[in-house]
Image (cartoon, grey):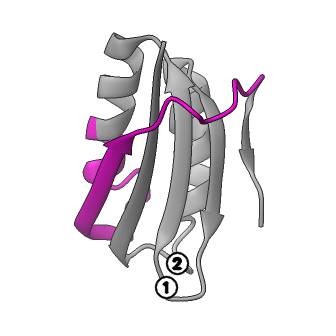
Amino acid sequence: MKKIKMTVSGRVQGVGFRYMTKMVADQIGVSGIVRNEDDGSVYIEAVGPTDKIDAFIAAVKRSPSPSGKVDTCKLEEDANIENYISFRVTN
């Protein structure tokens, strides 16, 4: 299992980014959370098999929302992320 956290910046709030991210996560088969941050970025935690996490990361970097645009993506693996059951929008 691979566990990652990402902070995505750009045009990622107010464009359906979180809900489209959840849709992509559900299609690929990863679990985790996505939420807006006060600084305008979006924070994501995702858990799943390496190949599915890699596909999810690629989809997020392309922006799952057609009106969104990812400028930067800070990504790191974190073994302390909980084992989520599903993928949720938390705010």
Task: Check contact, mark 2 vs mark 1: CB within 8 A.
Answer: yes
Type of amino acid under label 1: Gly
Dot 2: few (<14), some (14–19), or many (≥20) neighbours within 10 Å?
A: some
* Stretch in magenta: 58-85
Where is mark 2, residue-wise?
13
Type of amino acid under label 2: Gln
Look at 61% across and 72% down and name the residue there.
36
**Up-down relation of residue 53 to residue 39 (above or below):** above
Answer left or right for 48 relative to 9.
right
Query: Is 33 inside the magenta-drawn segment?
Result: no
The residue closer to the viewer here, 29 or 49, is 49
Look at 77% across and 67% down and name the residue there.
91
Look at 46% across and 76% down and name the residue there.
41
Query: Is 65 inside the magenta-drawn segment?
Result: yes
**Up-down relation of residue 73 to residue 36 (above or below):** above
Q: How many numbered discs sit on the rendered protein? A: 2
**Up-down relation of residue 25 to residue 36 (above or below):** above
Where is mark 1, residue-wise?
40
Q: Residue 10 location, x and y as percent? A: 32, 78
Look at 29% across and 70% down and name the residue there.
69
Q: Secondary structure at mark 1?
A: loop
Answer left or right for 34 relative to 8.
right
